């Protein structure tokens, strides 16, 4: 939802300033900063994947085949996850389709996107885990960038606090009262950026296909597990009378599963050679150099 917010970071000596979630308008249609920033994050992820995939013999055309299916289906998944978590607020198909009012959940996008990549990998006879190692670092880079769309919306912040890095927010979400909160959008952005850097440093030491995939989601799950606990706008689920933060529990599960798998393979040490897609002999030899 488009809004103007007044923000500040008093702990860093940054006084009050205004941000408008609308970047510009075209023929009377408002274009939000959120949409532009998310799109930029997607482009960065695709460029990164193209660069990584080339190193294992997956050519540009193959990567674009993944992209044209995974991105739109991922967006649909992100929307459905959000809608299903707050189904009581949606009363018609038009409400569900009205994505301009906001409401995307990264986990839904990841689940739908991953299933799509599995299917495309099977059809194109490309090792899923090898390709996942190429694209998952780009996903957390995109998420690190995309969180700044939340900043422009003045949303996705945490509970009230007096911590040194607190952010002052005044908009419709705070009842137009200046409130000092955890800038959880910033926490997650920095956590993901750090993970992206560290995983790329480690990348050359990769021992088996899927190792980077496990490291990326393990890292993301660990950070999101703690950061989600600070959020003031978490999606909640109620099972058998117990209410819990859906994304926090899911993050914890992802972290535990990935950590367990990394430990298992550290002990078992898979002996299968790293995947390389050899389409044409001359091209394969060129790429291996």
Image (cartoon, rainbow, N blue to C red):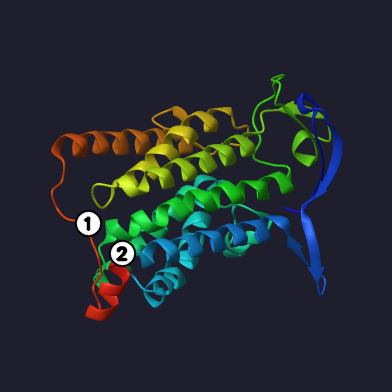
Find residue 42 and report its image quarter.
bottom right
Q: Mark 2: which secondary structure?
A: loop
As drawn, 80 above or below 171: below
**Residue 44: image location, x then y, percent:** 55, 60
**CA–CA distance between discs 2 and 1?**
9 Å
Q: What residue would you read off at disc 1?
A: 274
Q: Going 54% across and 31% down the picture, which residue do you hit?
A: 227
From the viewer's perspective, tell me whether residue 275 is left or right of residue 196.
left
* Callout 1 crowding tier (Cα within 10 Å): few <14, some 14–19, many ≥20: few
**Residue 250: image location, x then y, percent:** 41, 38
Q: Going 47% across and 53% down the picture, which residue do you hit?
A: 139
Please state the total of marks drawn on the protein image: 2
Q: Earlier in the sequence, mark 2 or mark 1?
A: 2
Work out which quarter of the rendered image holds the C terminus and state it: bottom left
Residue 176: in sight, yes or no?
A: yes
From the viewer's perspective, tell me whether residue 205 is left or right of residue 43.
left
Q: Are marks 2 and 1 in contact (CB under 8 Å)?
A: yes
Q: Nearer the viewer, residue 277 or 143?
A: 277
* Callout 2 crowding tier (Cα within 10 Å): few <14, some 14–19, many ≥20: some
From the viewer's perspective, tell me whether residue 111 is left or right of residue 280.
right
Q: Nearer the viewer, residue 100 or 214?
A: 214
Q: Mark 1: which secondary structure?
A: loop
Q: What residue would you read off at disc 2?
A: 56
Task: Name the disc covering residue 42, or none.
Answer: none
As drawn, 102 above or below 11: below
**Residue 142: image location, x then y, percent:** 54, 53
């Amino acid at each position: 939802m488009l809004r103007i917010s007044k923000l500040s970071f008093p702990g860093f000596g940054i006084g009050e300033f205004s941000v408008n979630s609308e970047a510009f308008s075209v023929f009377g249609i408002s274009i939000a900063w959120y949409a532009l920033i998310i799109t930029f994050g997607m482009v960065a992820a695709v460029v990164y994947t193209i660069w990584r995939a080339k190193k294992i013999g997956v050519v540009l055309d193959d990567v674009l085949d993944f992209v044209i299916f995974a991105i739109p289906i991922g967006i649909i998944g992100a929307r459905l996850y959000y809608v299903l978590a707050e189904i009581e607020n949606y009363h018609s198909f038009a409400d569900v389709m009205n994505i301009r009012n906001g409401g995307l959940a990264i986990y839904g996008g990841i689940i739908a996107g991953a299933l799509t990549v599995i299917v495309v990998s099977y059809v194109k006879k490309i090792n899923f885990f090898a390709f996942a190692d190429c694209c998952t670092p780009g996903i957390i880079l995109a998420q690190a960038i995309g969180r700044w769309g939340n900043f422009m919306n003045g949303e996705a912040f945490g509970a009230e606090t007096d911590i040194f890095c607190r952010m002052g927010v005044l908009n419709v979400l705070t009842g137009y009262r200046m409130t000092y909160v955890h800038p959880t959008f910033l926490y997650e952005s920095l956590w993901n950026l750090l993970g992206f850097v560290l995983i790329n440093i480690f990348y050359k030491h990769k021992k088996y296909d899927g190792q980077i995939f496990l490291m990326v989601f393990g890292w993301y799950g660990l950070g999101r597990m703690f950061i989600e606990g600070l959020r003031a706008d978490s999606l909640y689920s109620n099972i058998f009378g117990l209410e819990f933060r859906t994304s926090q529990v899911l993050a914890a599960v992802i972290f535990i599963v990935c950590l367990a798998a990394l430990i298992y393979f550290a002990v078992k040490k898979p002996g299968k050679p790293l995947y390389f897609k050899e389409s044409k002999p001359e091209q394969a030899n060129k790429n291996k150099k």
